[in-house]
Amino acid sequence: MRLGSGELTDSLAFDHITEYSPKIVNFFRQYPKSTFEFKTKSNNVRLLTSAPGAKNIIISWSLNPQKLIDTAEYFTASLEERLEAAQACTAAGYRVAFHFDPIICYSGWETDYEVLINTVFTKIESNTIAWLSLGTLRISPQLKKIIENRFPENALLDEELLTGFDGKLRYPAEIRSFIYTTMNSWIRKNNKSVPVYLCMEEREMHRDTHLSLKHETKQTTVIF
């Protein structure tokens, strides 16, 4: 069974205050057939790396090109800091994962995301990567209005967005399919076997891209 934290907030940003991570790691040492995932955009891994890692503990980072981190991911670790934290975690004995999610479509995205993927595989040993996920921007109509009101100069929502299968605003299906197949081709140029799946997507997209869907795996998410 796969469990994890970080769906609604960051798993590690406040770990130096809560001191949860060593307790979770030590608990899951007793259950090697289960997997626990910490999802984060921080580099706050000091407590994690102070204890021996466990192979059933995955530390994962959501990644975007640095220009998007600068303009939209306020108060988070830089791309370089995230990858350095991942290196520290693998050195401590953990496995890592990366979520290219949400992928943002904009003029020149192909160049930036190809560099991003190549950078990940340059910095991180492939055999320490548990999985990679791909997901494009999706938001509720209400959230779109909030973003536009609070950040009128932000260009994140400039591309066409349509109401999707789940009521959220998404890029048109043909654009999403192109993004996923293109991203996957760059990943496969670097590594042929690392698991890659689509996050929060419909079954038709799985058929178009031949990528697996996250909800087809047995997993439970717990929120802290």
Image: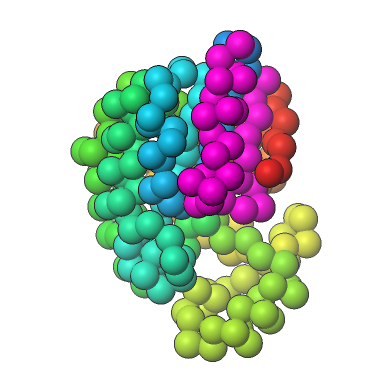
Whether residue 163 is situated above or below residue 77 in the rendered picture: below
Q: Is residue 20 visible?
A: yes
Residue 111 horizontal/vertical position (percent): 28, 59
Q: Is residue 148 inside the magenta stretch? A: no
Give the quarter of the figure containing the C terminus: top right
Position of 79 with respect to 23 (left or right) is left
Q: Residue at x 68, y 81 (%)?
A: 145
Residue extending furthest left?
Answer: 122
Quarter of the image where the N terminus is located: top right
Residue 188 visible in this rendered orientation of the protein: no
Left or right: residue 194 versus residue 29 is left
The residue drawn where x is 23% and y is 38% is 123
- Expressed as whole percent of the image width and height from the top left, the position of residue 78 reads 33, 58
Q: Position of residue 161 (x, y in %)?
A: 62, 71
Report the residue at 51% width, 79% height from top: 158
Is residue 25 covered in magenta?
yes
Image spot of residue 53 (x, y percent): 42, 21
Give whichever of 4, 129 is nearer the camera.
4
- The image quadrant that residue 75 belongs to is bottom left
175 relative to 201 in the view: left or right: left
Number of labelled discs?
Answer: 0
Q: Which residues are magenta?
A: 1-30
